[in-house]
Image: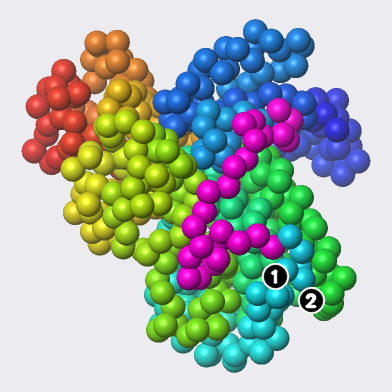
Amino acid sequence: MGPLTPELSDAVADHMNIRRGEVHEVVSFYSFLRVPVDAVRVCIGPVCDCLGAKDVLAREQEQANGVPVLGVECLGHCDLAPVLLRGDTVEPEVTYRANDGPSTGLAGWDETLADYEARGGFEVLRDLPAPERIVEELKASGLTGYGGAGFPTGIKWEAVAREPHPRYVVVNADEGEPGTIKDRYVMERRPYLMLEGMLIAMRFAGAEHGFVYLREEYGTARARLTQAIDELRQAGHLDGVAVEMVVGAGAYICGEETAMLESMEGRRGMPRLKPPFPSEVGYLGRPTLINNVETLAHIPAILRTGGEAWPHVRLWSVSGAVREPGCYEAPVDVTLRRLIDEHAGGATEEIGAIVPGGAASGILPPAALDAPLTRDALREWDVGAGSAGVQVFPKSYSPLRLLAETMRFFAEESCQKCTPCRIGNRGMHHLLQELERGRVAMSREQAEEWLDAMAATSICGLGQGAPFPMRAAFRYWPELFAPLGEPSRMA
């Protein structure tokens, strides 16, 4: 199968008896609907850029031999940086680094359903507590959404339970935040664990249909999930319910839950205004319970041990200038120093900056290495925990370059629906490009006004969160912005 050409797009429209423009509109939104399946995609996100991605891109372009070679945003394999996809094949070859934690057992590998059941898999599903008890245990655990938003899981499940049938369950597996690889690890190493969490959610919600919205770049996870779902079906675990996989098409914004729902319904992945929330009006207008992969992977352990006894852990993606980049299970209040030194093998050179939780979480100086990575502790540093995608950058990589590449990412991945995000991110990227060239594009006061407008009036978390890296850089690297003039009194 090749890209969806204009001719194929017209044929699809004619077959579905809809306007051709409607199909063209959708195709133009999703980058991978226009990319040949044998194309070479080189990640040029901040971590890969820091570790030589531009050289890799130039080499591949020289040796292309007629095969398209594209520089693209984060490919979700940050532990291998600089990384490329040759079709669905990842280069360099995946090497898993994960420690065995008390909850997910991430260092283990379930090759088959029998492997998972030998670990005690599906025991919770077979003897599931009453819905009220499930909500109590989730609330007692303090589990929040580990996709980045951090909304309390028990409250979300309780809200769905109040809504009328029919209801749906959707797994958000569109892990697009740069530096974040934890969901990929779960799906590739322990897919049955996530699926048990999903089936618990479906049983709780009384949902007959469940969906996994999977990131397109995750070819190995797609194969593993396909195998796992087939095994569950053959074993009778899916009797009376249907579980389907929906593969995305290259849009970071579809990690936002309402944009994901728009995509699932065949439209451009643009966020919806809230309220109503998906728990009230979700997929096909029905109440929908949405959780990301890691959140669901913790559910069986919480219900097995009880919420109070759950060890309060999460999965941390660590990439960049460390000796052993990978995914590690650690307490929610772990420090950056412990993550880097005790899990990721230590830094490869002097640290210059750290991104604590994915691109939208902000940027920290080395002085923050001993800060606990909790939301409350990080609030004092004007950053967030986000999706726990820790990216470590060496002192040799300029914070201005890091910031410029981050804002370029946001500018490229904006869905363009709302003006503050569409114009604001491009404006900030232009400002930083000019600063790198020694020129001034706007004053510090103007930049702050733009950031205020983005945070206050953008529709979704992309535009609302994009100011965090800029604000952090203003605070911790003020010398970089001296040419812009004095900060305003509102800073």
Q: Is residue 93 magenta?
A: yes
**From the viewer's perspective, is 119 left or right of 410?**
right
Q: Nearer the viewer, residue 476 or 337?
A: 337
Badge 2: residue crowd in 10 Å (few <14, some 14–19, many ≥20):
some
Q: Which numbered disc covers residue 261?
A: none
Magenta stretch secondary structure, dominant: loop
- Which image quarter holds the N terminus? top right
The residue that label 2 is drawn on is: 237
What range of the chain is rendered magenta? 86-110
Q: How many marks?
A: 2
Q: Position of residue 123 (x, y in %)?
A: 67, 83
Q: Of the residues shown, which amino acid type is indicated by label 2?
A: His
Is any atom of residue 73 visible in this view? no
On screen, residue 84 above or below 463:
above
Q: Quadrant of residue 56?
A: top right
> Residue 249, position in %: x, y?
68, 40
332 displayed left or right of 45? left
Residue 254 placement (x, y as % from top left): 58, 47
Q: Quadrant of residue 286?
A: bottom right
Left/right of residue 307 with respect to residue 59 in the rendered view: left
Residue name at image x 54 percent, y 35 percent:
80
Residue pointed to by mark 1: 116
Assess disc 1: are there few (<14), some (14-19) or many (≥20) residues with their C-alpha within 10 Å of its C-alpha: some
